[in-house]
Image (cartoon, rainbow, N blue to C red):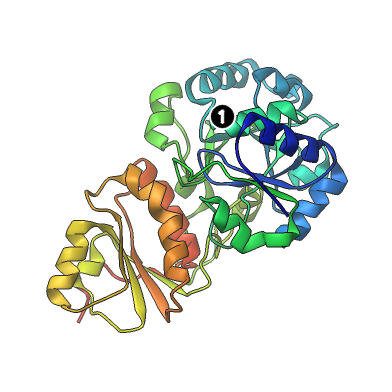
Amino acid sequence: MILLGASDTELRRGAELLKMGKLVAFPTETVYGLGADAFNTRALARVFEAKGRPRFDPLIIHIARFDALDRIVLFEALDGRRRTLLDKIAASFWPGPLTLVLPKRKEVPDLATAGLATAALRFPSHPAAQALITLSTGAVAAPSANPFGRLSPTRAEHVIEGLGDKIDCVIDGGPSAVGVESTVLDLSVSGPPRILRYGGIGREALEAAIGPVEAPAAAAGEDAAGAYPQGGRSSPGTEDRARSAPGNLRGHYAPGTPLILHGSDALAYSVYRGGEGYLFFSGKNRDAFVGRNPGASALFVLSEAGSVLEAAANLFELLHRLDRLGLDRIHAEMLPQEGLGAALNDRLSRASAGSLLPPPGKYT
C-alpha cells in the first residue's frame, strides 16, 4: 500500500492509480472515502471485496464538476419540478456534504448502484478530493474507507488500521472537518424530496432552501433516533428505501466494542462500572457524572462546550479511541435532535443496533 500526501504531485500520482483501476482512499470534508473509477466494474468489485460490503448496498459517485452529471444522470426522467429542485439544491449545497439520489443513465454500471435505476451523487468540498477526481476520471465511486459496518474513518490512520494492504493507496489530507457522512436526499421520487440518511446537512437547512422535505422517520418507519423501534419490525417499504442509500442498515458505524445508547443527558444519572467507557455530549454532563461517580475513568467528551458542530467532528475519532481500550462496552448519550444532532443520533443508534436505554430518572 502506498501512502501519499495531498500535494499536487502526489494527487496526480493518486489520480493515475485510479485511472489504472486501483483503489485509492482519499480525504473528504465528511469522512475518508475508498475511491474507484465509477465506470470500471473490476475496480468497483474490488471495493466491495476490500470492505466486505454486500453487493446490494449502493455506492456514492463523487464528482468535481457540475457538467459531470451529464454522464450519469438521466435528466429526461426528471419532470420540471424536480429539475428546478435539483438546480436550487445544487446551487445551495454543492460542493458540500449532501448526496442526491437521481435517475441514472444506462451507462452507469449496475454494480455502482446495486442494480437500482438511480445513482447517488455527491460533489465534495474538500480541495484534495476535488483535485483527485478532476485529475482522474471525473467520476469516482467512494464509500467510506473502512470495513463494512464498522466505524467511519476521519483520519488516514483509521483507513490504514481498518483496510491496510487490501487497498492500493491512501492519501493523507488530515482530519475530516465535518466528521459525519453526507445527508442523502432522494430526488427521484414524485412527491416531496425524501431524506434517506441524516448527515452533514440538516433537514432545517434543506427546508429553508427548497421547502418541505420528508424525513427518515416518516419515510422509513423509524424512531426519532434513526433506528427501527426496538424489538419491532420496519414498516412496509423500509427495506427498499434503506437499500436506496448507503449506511442505512442496522448495526452500521459500529465499533468492535458493544455500544449502549442512552437518552439525551442520561449518562449523568447512571452508575459507573469499571472496565466500561463513557462518551458524553458535553463537559457539563461529564462533570455531573463524575460528581455521582468519583474516580470514574475512560470518560470522553464530544464537545466541552456542548457544540453539535464540534461533536460531529470528534464523534468517530473518539469512538476509535474508545474501541482501542479493550473495554467490555461503551456507553454513549444522544444529542439534541436538531440539525447535525439528528445525524449523530442516527450514527449512534445504528452503532448500538437500537439498544436505547431509558431517559433520566429511570436509573437506580
Q: Position of residue 128 (x, y in %)?
A: 59, 33
| Residue at which label 1 appears | 127
The quadrant the C terminus occupies is: bottom left
Q: Relative to 69, is 2 above or below?
A: below
The percent position of residue 349, horizontal first and vertical second, equals: 44, 61
Q: In which image quadrant can residue 134 be found? A: top right
Identify whether 225 is placed above or below 269. above
Snapshot quadrant of residue 78:
top right
Q: Is residue 267 left or right of residue 149?
A: left
Q: Looking at this view, is 150 or 170 the one in front?
A: 170
Q: Nearer the viewer, residue 320 or 185?
A: 320
Q: Residues within 10 Å of mark 1 (few under 14, many from 20)?
A: some
Q: Quick one: 275 or 254, which is closer to the camera? A: 275
- Residue 38, picture quadrant: top right
Residue at image position (57%, 16%) is: 84
Looking at numbered disc 1 in the image, what kind of residue is underneath it? Pro
**Residue 351 in sight in this render:** yes
- Is 89 situated above or below 158? above
Name the residue rendered at 46%, 23% in the picture.
210
Tell me where residue 250 appears, x and y as whole percent.
Answer: 55, 63
Residue drawn at (41%, 51%) of the image: 344
In this rendering, the answer to whether 120 lies above or below 359 is above
- Quadrant containing the N terminus is bottom right
Q: Position of residue 200 (x, y in %)?
A: 46, 40
